[in-house]
Image: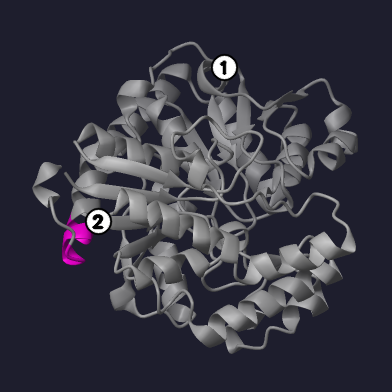
Amino acid sequence: MSRLLSLNTYHYRRGGSDVVFFEHAHMFEERGWSTAMFTMHHPRNIDSPWSQYFCEELEFGHQYGLKDTLLRAGRVIYSLDAKQQIERLIADFKPDVAHAHCIYHHLSPSVLVALKEHHVPTVMTAHDLKLACPAYKMLNRQGICEKCKSGNLLHLPLNRCIRDSLGASMLVMLESAIHKSLGLYKRYLDQVITPSKFFRSKLIEWGWSSTQLAYVPNFIDCRDYTLSPDFRNHVLYFGRLAPEKGVDTLIRAAHRTGIELEIVGTGPEEVALKAMPESQSPLIKFLGRLEGDALKAAIHRARAVVLPSRWYENAPMSILEAYASGRIVIGANIGGIPELICINETGYLFDVDDIEGLATVLEKVCAMEDRTLLAMGKQARQWVSENFNRDQYAREMIKLYASLGVRGVNQI
């Protein structure tokens, strides 16, 4: 029996990358593999038989005293606690392969060093652009930014790229400078998986070798979603309420056209978005965080799902979820989003932050006959079921593991 060790910051479904973390491990369990998890402790973590090995919690949003702040700054750069804990887990579990998801500040690359020292082949899924951009997003207050590509990391504090904070930006500048100088990701990762072709190209632009990068798209099981012919005359956004998501542009476009908009999610921009003059309209509705059947019902109510991002999105799970539910997607023409939208077949694109352009598409979609939208939605579901399914993902992943010498590959 082959053994898979999965690493992630959180052991609960906080965002799309966490969903992939859990679903990836579950997929291999279904195929007879033994799996273990390694994350940090967190109050919202779901129960795990592996929690005795988890490392100490580290959250940037908490208020710490000077001593604790300095200790945590060291852990961001290289966590000895995480390294010691994962070494205990490696000794007891004896993994054949490790698969990291989001580990950066909270676990740190010290876990990669431990895995390499114990000769465990290790891959990482690049859910964001942290392996290139110290600030994850290649985005700051002025818009898309790739200034650090030159190697000059002083742009971080100059632009306050991390939470608009000078202190946090300087800490991440130091962290990134040390990690890059020691090659803690390039040297200790055997392969990096990019769920979008765009991310693969962008990492190559920033100095990663094409041989170390593998494109494996995300997956969704359409059997977990149903089709519904009953939708209303409004559109839906669901996801984090954060600056890079462009929800303010969507609110302005919806208000301009008089179209009802439902917004699902929470995040750092929630208060500011609710305070917008346009948000005072009864047509703009904030529903908070929804999960499971409640979220699926919200998707079914909508004529279309809108993704108005202004940063380099990777391969948003929200698009796959919308398609699996038989709903088309209206997306910003940026990052990996265009790869997932077949124009006039599964959805439409608009230029980033183009309020007028988005308003035009919203009006078009809301004026379309229901039967046309339903036919497009069925086509979207068929497309995603053929190209982004579990079996295809499993085949590509096991092929990658096999290339690293992992035994037991015939068990999937």
Q: Which residue is outermost to the top?
A: 230
Residue 26 falls left or right of residue 137: left
Residue drawn at x 27%, y 36% as measured from the top left: 29
Residue 55 or 154: which is nearer the viewer? 55
Label 2 residue SS: loop
Is 28 in the magenta?
Answer: no
Q: Which dot marks residue 96?
A: 2
Q: Main secondary structure of the magenta part?
A: helix
Label 1 residue SS: helix
Residue 265: quadrant of the picture:
top right
Residue 106 or 325: which is nearer the viewer? 106
Looking at the picture, does residue 103 appear above or below residue 298?
below
Q: Give the range drawn in magenta.
A: 399-405
Residue 362 falls left or right of residue 65: left
Residue 111 falls left or right of residue 384: right
Tag 1: amino acid:
Ala
Please say whether residue 341 is visible from this viewpoint: no
Q: Which residue is outermost to the left?
A: 410
Q: Mark 1 points at which residue?
A: 294
Real-space CA distance between mark 2 and mark 1, rounded to the nearest whole angstrom:
38 Å
Residue 141: quadrant of the picture:
bottom right
Tag 2: amino acid:
Asp
Residue drawn at x 38%, y 37% as measured from the top left: 23
Is 403 in the magenta?
Answer: yes
Looking at the picture, does residue 249 appear above or below residue 136?
above
